[in-house]
Each structure stands twice: as structure tokens, then as C-alpha cells.
Image: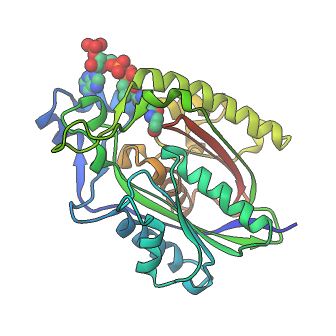
Amino acid sequence: MIYSKITSVGGYLPSNILTNKDLERSLDTSDEWIVTMTGIKERHIIDPNETSSDMAYKATLDAIKTSKKDLKEIDLIIVATTTPDKIFPSTACALQNKLGIGECPAFDIQAVCSGFIYALSIADKFINTGSKKNVLVVGVDAMSKITDYSDRSNAILWGDGAGAVIVSASDKPGIISTHIHSDGKYESLLHVPRTKNLSGKDTIEMQGNQVFKIAVNTLDRIVDETLKANNLKKSDIDWLVPHQANIRILEATAKKLDMSMDRVIVTIDKHGNTSAASIPLALNDGIKSGKIKPGETILMEAFGGGFTWGSALIKY
Ligand code: UT7
């Protein structure tokens, strides 16, 4: 059996920070409401001329810095994003060009906030079959480019960033299992319809309250599915590295796992919801801060537009 293992992590966040106080100046909202209802204090916003592939490139260089692998050893690039640089070609191809590592295959995955879990799952399968040895998986989103900053229920939530991991073939288990699902019937609860008017940009529309309730229940089920598939007890999980959508959703999943919040990697206060980037950025934070140690068992889970959802159980 060829296993796959995350051997290196990296992240990138744009330097421009948008605080709750900044939002108070243009919206009918308050720092207190945002912190209480979401846990978010600030988020990073990219420059207008910066793109998702620029952020992906910087996150990849950060991952390579601490990797024993050379860029030339990457034999597959998968980018999870909802905010591609262009309609085509893929952001993965744009990233490949910036990295100067043709001619390995490169493609994008669109599963919104669950994109990183989907991409990791695909990387795992390519490695398990012996077809690839070192896969670059990037979760990147420039959510500010599709946010309506006059809509207070959306403007407060989203942030920009990129997280990258290198997944390599290993003789010991790293990625233990992945579980992915979708249900397209919920499409209209969280989506970006095509532009309604020619001058406008396409922006996120969300029935936040309904999404919230379905997210909590669905994440409950994915936790059960992951534990059952691996014959594990809740206490076998050392760390929860969740998608960062709302602190109250994170707390509900931690409660489901009988886990105290100090075993949950929380970045939502500083990053907001960075969609596909949120899990690799949180993993990067957990590892680089020294909280997550080699050999520990980590549960990652996500829920997003589609609806899509999924989990990955890994040993770091
Ligand atoms: O990552 C993908 C998945 N996404 C999610 O999981 C997001 C899930 N949803 C959420 O996180 C929450 O629904 C929100 C944080 C977006 C909103 O919280 P909520 O408890 O669902 O609030 P709500 O939409 O039911 O609105 C409650 C009230 C409303 O006022 P009224 O009608 O009761 O007078 C809203 O207009 O809160 C109001 N409100 C705000 N007030 C101050 C909505 N946004 C704001 C705001 N500041 N920014």
C-alpha cells in the first residue's frame, strides 16, 4: 500500500487588513455584533491588481521553504478555488507558470469552502494508485472580489488568503481517510448568480441562517462518518482543524467531539472566512505555532456552497 502524507505546509495573507471598526464606518453594524455572532475581528484583503494565483504562488513558496522536496519534484498541481484569475485557463496553470514547473498536470477544483478537502482527497487517490509522488495542493480564495460591501450580512464574513500543502508518497499512513459529499438541491441558499446587470460584479448571495443550521447538522454527521469509518473514539482525535465559517459552528463541532476549544485551531478572528484557503491556513497556523506535533491525529472538516461538505483524517 502506498500512503500519502502532508510533508510541508505554507500560507499567505495579503497585508491589507479590514477591521470591524473599518466596516462600522460604511455599514449599519458593530464590532460587538460581528464578534458575538461570528467570532471575526478582522480579515485580509488583496490589492485590486493581485490575483488568486499570486496568493497561491506565495503560499507555495512558503511551503517549499520548509520542505525537503524541490519544486521540480512536484508531479501534480491541484488548486481549490472559487475565485479563479480567469474563466480559463485554470488558476492551477497560472500557478504552474509562475512556479516555472511545466509539464506536470495542473487543474482546479470548484467545491467552494470544501474545495481543499476535495483537492486533498484527489491528491491522496493519485498517490495511493502509484500514479504521482509529490502533489502540490493549494486552497486559495479572493472572496473580496465577489463580496457586495453594501450587504452587511456578507461583507463582515469573508476574507482573502491562500494555504498550500505538499502531499508526498509515504510508507506510513499520513492521510488516513477522506470523505466527500455534495447535494445540489441547496444551490440557491449560498451562491453567486451570473451578473444581473452589465456594470455590476457577481456577488455572494446567502440565506445565512438556513446555511448555519444545515452546516451544524451536516458537520455533526461527517464527524460520525469519519470516526466510524476508522473505528475511532472521539478521544482519539488530538486536533480539530475546521473550515473557519463562524466561531459558533466551530464550537458546535467541538462540542460534538467532546473537545475543549483549546484543541481546535481557530483563525477566524484574524482571517474571517477565506473559503478554500481556510483549512490549509489553519493547518499552517497550528503547525508553525508548535501546537500540532508530529504523530498527532487531526480531523479536518468543511461545509460550503453546493452544498458540498467533507472531512479528512490525518496523522501529521
Ligand atoms: O463557509 C460557508 C458556509 N457559510 C456559513 O456557514 C455561514 C453561516 N451563517 C452565518 O454565519 C450566520 O447566518 C450569519 C453570521 C451570516 C448571520 O447570523 P444569524 O444569526 O443567522 O443572523 P440572521 O441572518 O438571522 O439575522 C439576524 C439579525 C437580522 O436583523 P432582524 O431582521 O432580526 O432585525 C439581520 O438583519 O441580524 C441582522 N444582521 C446584522 N446586524 C448587525 C445581519 N447582519 C448584520 C450585521 N450587523 N453585520
Residue nearest the observer in this picture, 179 or 198: 198
Quadrant location of the N terminus in the rendered image: bottom right
> Residue at position x 34%, y 48% from top?
143
> Residue at position x 71%, y 61% from top?
124
Quadrant location of the C terminus in the rendered image: bottom right
Residue 195 figure quarter:
top left
Where is 185 relative to 127, above or below? above
Residue 85 figure quarter:
bottom left
Residue nearest the observer in this picture, 185 or 126: 185
Q: Quadrant of ligand 1?
A: top left
> In this rendering, does residue 246 appear at all?
no
Residue 138: image location, x then y, percent? 51, 63
Residue 109: image location, x then y, percent? 53, 55
Residue 210: image location, x then y, percent? 46, 21
> Residue at position x 54%, y 24% from top?
214
Instruction: In the displayed orientation, state which residue is furthest to the left.
Output: 25
Q: Is residue 272 left or right of residue 210?
A: left
> In this rendering, does residue 200 appear at all?
yes
Residue 116: image location, x then y, percent? 55, 53
Q: Is residue 169 left or right of residue 144?
A: right
Where is 81 relative to 126, above or below? above
> Residue at position x 71%, y 55% from top?
314
Residue 169 figure quarter:
bottom right
Q: How many marks?
A: 0
Applied colour scheme: rainbow
Residue nearest the observer in this picture, 129 or 144: 129
Instruction: In the displayed orientation, state which residue is furthest to the front.
Output: 198
